[in-house]
Image (cartoon, rainbow, N blue to C red):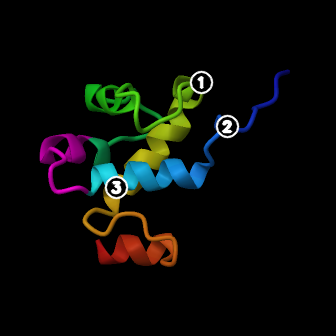
Amino acid sequence: MSQLQPMKLESQGLGSHIGRISARICHQAFPTGQRAALRRMVPTQPPPIQFYRFATDGETLPQNWWQHESDWVTLIAGIALTFPLGHQPEIGMGKALAQS
């Protein structure tokens, strides 16, 4: 029986990745259709092509993102749901979702 291994993020911490993901998704220039597709993602279903475009840009996710794909799908979908506020560490997730 194998145990699930926690995500290991190369030299950058999870907070750094979350900040970059949020800044990118919530930027005015980010395509509305792509943001909508990311908002509709469900971790138990295969992600849309827009997720793979986002994940493989080489800038936002760590190189080993595919080893924990469902974790990144969940995180990115959650951040996309908080648009237009994006990730604000000082605000709880429930409050951010209520304000979005």
| Residue that numbered label 2 is attached to | 7
| Residue that numbered label 1 is attached to | 67
Residue type, numbered disc 2 = Met
Q: Are marks 2 and 1 in contact (CB under 8 Å)?
A: yes
Q: Which residues are magenta?
A: 27-37
* Residue 28 lies within the magenta run: yes
Q: Quadrant of the N terminus?
A: top right
Q: Earlier in the sequence, mark 2 or mark 1?
A: 2
Give the quadrant of residue 56: top left
Q: Residues within 10 Å of mark 3 (few under 14, many from 20)?
A: some
Q: In the structure shown, which secondary structural element does the residue marked by tag 1 occupy?
A: helix
Q: Earlier in the sequence, mark 1 or mark 3?
A: 3
Q: Residue furthest front?
A: 11
Give the quadrant of residue 33: top left
Above-or-below relation of 9 to 67? below
Q: In the structure shown, which secondary structural element does the residue marked by tag 3 occupy?
A: helix
Q: Earlier in the sequence, mark 2 or mark 3?
A: 2
| Residue that numbered label 3 is attached to | 23
Residue type, numbered disc 3 = Ala
List x then y, in percent, for residue 97.
37, 70
Q: Which numbered tag is attached to residue 16?
A: none
Residue at image position (73%, 38%) is 6
Q: Horizontal placement of 1 versus 85: left or right?
A: right
Q: Nearer the viewer, residue 93 or 24?
A: 24
* Residue 30 lies within the magenta run: yes
Q: Residue furthest top?
A: 1
